[in-house]
Amino acid sequence: MTTLFRHICFFWILVIFYTSQTSAEIYPVEAWAKRANIANVSLSPNGETLALLRINSTGENPQIEIYKAETLERIGQMDADPMEITRFYWVTDDRIFFRARQKVRDKIDGYNRGVYENSSGIITLDGKNSTVKKLGPELGGGLASTLPKYPNKVILSAGRRPTKYFLYDIETKRKKLITRESEEKYGFDFDEDGNPMTARGYDGVTNEFVSYYRPIGSTEWDVVNKTHRESFESWYIAGRDPLDPTDLLVVAHNGNDKLGLWSFDPQEKQYKELIYRRNDVDIAGVRFHTNYRKHPDLITGVRYYQGNEEKIEWFDGEEKALYDQIKALIPHAGRFSINTRSVDGNSLIVENYSPRDPGTFYLLKNGELKVIGSTKPQLASDALADVKAITYKARDGKNIHGSITIPNSPPPYPLVVMPHGGPFVPEKVFYDEWGQLLANNGYLVLQPSYRGTEGYGLDFYQTAFINGGQGGYQMQDDKDDGALFLAEEGLADPDRMMMFGWSYGGYAALVAAARDPQIYQCVIAGASVPDPNEQVNYSRNRMNAFVTRTSIEQIKMWDNSVSPINEVENVNIPMLLIHGDVDQRTPPRAVRRYIKELEKHDKVFDQVWLKGADHFYNTLFFDHKVKFYTAMIDYLKNDCFKNSNKIAQR
């Protein structure tokens, strides 16, 4: 089949399919801007009670609601006012541990030091007399383990470096320090008996990341692996080998391009056997037993992604059968998980996400599957858009993977290229609010896994660091080549192409605005990085405290990448800038300097500032998103092409 014939077939198949669809309802931005209606649905250990976080009305904080699992009758609700509960965990049948946050300042306190402070507490359920006890700052770091084998006991963390861990008895309120480690060790994991099992560190003399392991019955740490920071290979302990608890299962490259799962002898510090590795993609990690209360830390499979589909290579036949049976029952099944399961295994909570399901929770009890609720009940599945995985060739012949969100109408479409942030984090599109919002308004959305994206092997990841950083060079070519591919396929209108991104994606949009030749009509840059040198300095300052792979990645990539603030004179299309005024990850001062340069060079742009919004999605509240989404849709509809024509006529 010739390339031309393939293109024609692909185009007309889509035309026929989408012409047959009824026009989907276009939702107002308020429908998209609403925060999740319910979240964090989970069962008590005995399976008799379930709890969830619910936002009852726009602008309110989530409340914990308690239900009888048998009848789904609500029997209580509570909050931690003035703090906002962000997450909770069942500890016993009548006690819940929760995490909460509160805005404590109006301005950021420097890079990665935002306006919120976190805390935690214990809720004791006693009918109508339920009590909320907030824990002090010395125990407010987080929950390290619920210790399901030991009722009323949990492991809590406190402090940053060094982090302290305490065994806390929620009945007697007594705490016991269980780690007395120096700053060289961090990131502790504990076994099912509450013993420190693994830790990480960094050797500044040899520039190596260090993995520590404490064998069963020992109080001494062994160094089981060192990985030089320039290799960029991954190595971490996933857990103990279920076939031989004296051995470990580790996720590692071990000199290979793709990440695999290995059996590892910690005493001899040697790999024993390759358990699973693929030639096409990295493994994404392991899967633990769905009944972690009865089988803590039992590894039952290994996960990987093909396209946007999560796949599992199972080690446990019963877990596979349960997974397959549930998947067959769920409408629009995509990425789903068993969030919690009763100790007896007979009751469980299932959560599903897919392009046409923003998130639905189910209760399986006594052989009956019941719908608990949806995160976005205002959005009908028929009005949402399909997401398809694609692969295309970059200009140098490299295969680039990505996802397209396709409107419920016939092509060709106006195109929005929406690169992910990070930039290295792997992106798998199950349900993406921004992509669905844009598709609902008629835009085809491309989310490319450009060079540097993890999940496709070490070589693909490391190409982001060739000749310094490739930000604005090959990494940018990969995005543009995806847009040109979709235009060639007849899906995208080449005269109506735009780029929108957040964080690194916002940086990519700024770079796109100054490229020549130009393929876009406008860009929208959210929470962007106009000055990579500033981000490099942030990462270097962070490394003064402790070295992480992330800080090294950021320095390597940003150090020699294109700097948008130095390219303002070359900007040749209009842009919309969106930024939170308390953004701690990309502080606003660089954007304000960039705006002054735009004004100095008489460039066409608009700006939207989100008051009280930080960098992260969970700090974008309803009012922020209404303002953000309204500005974006209005700009694409009314200003993008009009302003680009003005520039073209100059």
Image (cartoon, rainbow, N blue to C red):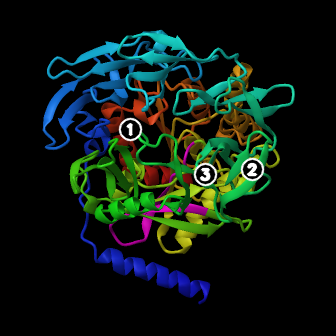
User: Could you tell whether 554 is left or right of 402 in the image?
Assistant: right
What numbered label is drawn on residue 462?
Answer: 2
- Towards the viewer: 217 or 80: 217
SS state under label 3: loop
User: Could you tell whether 524 is left or right of 482 in the image?
Assistant: left
Q: Where does label 1 land, which residue? A: 628
At horizontal 63% and vertical 45% (from top left) the residue drawn is: 424
Instruction: Kindly give the residue lying farthest to the right in the view shown.
Output: 206
Instruction: Kindly give the residue lying farthest to the front in the view shown.
Output: 217
Residue 644 place in picture, x, y as percent: 50, 52
**Do the residues under discs 2 and 3 have CB atoms within 8 angstroms?**
no
Residue 152 place in picture, x, y as percent: 38, 22
Residue 103 place in picture, x, y as percent: 40, 17
The disc labelled 1 sits on which kind of residue?
A: Phe
Q: Which range is magenta?
A: 401-421
Disc 2 crowd, CA 10 A, few/some/many (<14, 14-19, 20+): many
- The disc, 2 or 3, on the residue closer to the chain's N-terminal end is 3
What numbered label is drawn on residue 200?
Answer: none
Q: Where does label 3 land, which residue? A: 243
The disc labelled 2 sits on which kind of residue?
A: Gln
- The disc, 2 or 1, on the residue closer to the chain's N-terminal end is 2
Is residue 414 located in the magenta-colored stretch of the structure? yes
Give the Cα separation between the discs numbered 2 and 3: 35 Å
Residue 162 place in picture, x, y as percent: 64, 16
